[in-house]
Image: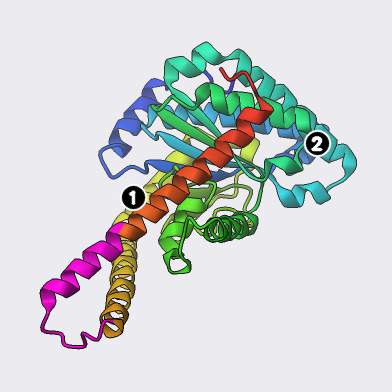
Amino acid sequence: MSWIREGELTIIERFCANIIKAGPMPKHVAFIMDGNRRYAQKCHVERQQGHSQGFDKLAQTLRWCLNLGIREVTVYAFSIENFKRSKEEVDGLMDLARQKFSRLLEEQENLKKHGVCIRVLGDLPLLPVDIQELIAQAVLATRNYNKCFLNVCFAYTSRHEISNAVREMAWGVEQGLLEPSDVSESLLDKCLYTNNSPDPDLLIRTSGEVRLSDFLLWQTSHSCLVFQSVLWPEYSFWNLCEAILQFQMNYSALQKARDSYLEERRQQQLERDQAYVSRKLQQEGCLSHGDSRRRRSLLQKCTALREERIQGFLQALEHKRADFLERLCPVSA
């Protein structure tokens, strides 16, 4: 099964899609694709068959998203916690990953046609080396495509991602690229595996479970969360439409909360900068607030120097991550 299934919507699906697209549409949708094992049990087939059917449903869902104009999708493919499952099931999932990433490398023309950029987010060194190499090839081969984006969270948990982001910032301070005062929520955002993506507008979990299971905890604080009872391999276009309608009904409140949070974060950074300027003026013996020109000059300098340090750090971090992939795949596509 191809990663992106070719085909168009039916007439009735196109009709409903056009109606839905008249309202605000999510630009980025995340999926917790839950229910593969229960589907296998329900259909009296092997667990591995359930997982394989789940991948086929992902390919179909990506096509629906493209037809609806949703240009970014993030999926929870394999949690670090899944390593605790039976050896037989974990080995089966690793074999499925080998098959699917190998297939992806055979679909270069299809991916180029649709402009699909594949990103794999997670602690890749936890995976077998051959799978790491396949992932590196897939990521490097598609990194310049920018029409749509598929983020596959593999060997991932959100707490692990956040811990890793904190370690990256600590590394930046140790290397002299950052000052301790540069560490902030905004910088942590940029150190996450998802740093190249906007936060999801809509998160969908199937199978009736109503928890996030350590998935995108940081990124979904202002997302619309939709929990649906359908098992993932049985997911339909109409289930997706239902979730989008729930997003549209809550759009105004979500957007207001997100804008308020961003303004609050901007204000907090301004207050930190102003406190730094006050300490600097105090050290210079200029306690008077009358010299507003000097205060503005220091504030601008403080902001410019911080941004320069942060940009240098982020470039170094990007280089470190790219170097890891290129070492796995010396001859990139």
Question: In which quadrant of the rendered view does residue 160 lie?
Answer: bottom right
The foreground one among 43 and 64 is 64
Residue sitting farthest toward the front = 284
User: Which numbered tag is attached to residue 47?
Assistant: 2
Spot occupied by residue 220 in the image (x, y as percentages of width and height): 47, 56
Specify the principal SS of the magenta part.
helix
How far apart marks 2 and 1 lie (CA) works out to 36 Å
In magenta segment, residue 249? no
Residue sitting farthest toward the right = 87
Kind of residue at badge 1: Gln
| Vertical position of residue 144 compared to residue 237: above or below | above
| Vertical position of residue 282 compared to residue 152: above or below | below
Q: Residue at x 74, y 26 (%)?
A: 98
Spot occupied by residue 132 in the image (x, y as percentages of width and height): 70, 32
Spot occupied by residue 287 in the image (x, y as percentages of width and height): 21, 88
In magenta segment, residue 298? yes
Which residue position is annotated with label 1?
Answer: 248
Residue 93 in view here: yes
Mark 2 secondary-structure assignment = helix
- What's the magenta region? 284-304
Q: Residue at x 82, y 51 (%)?
A: 84
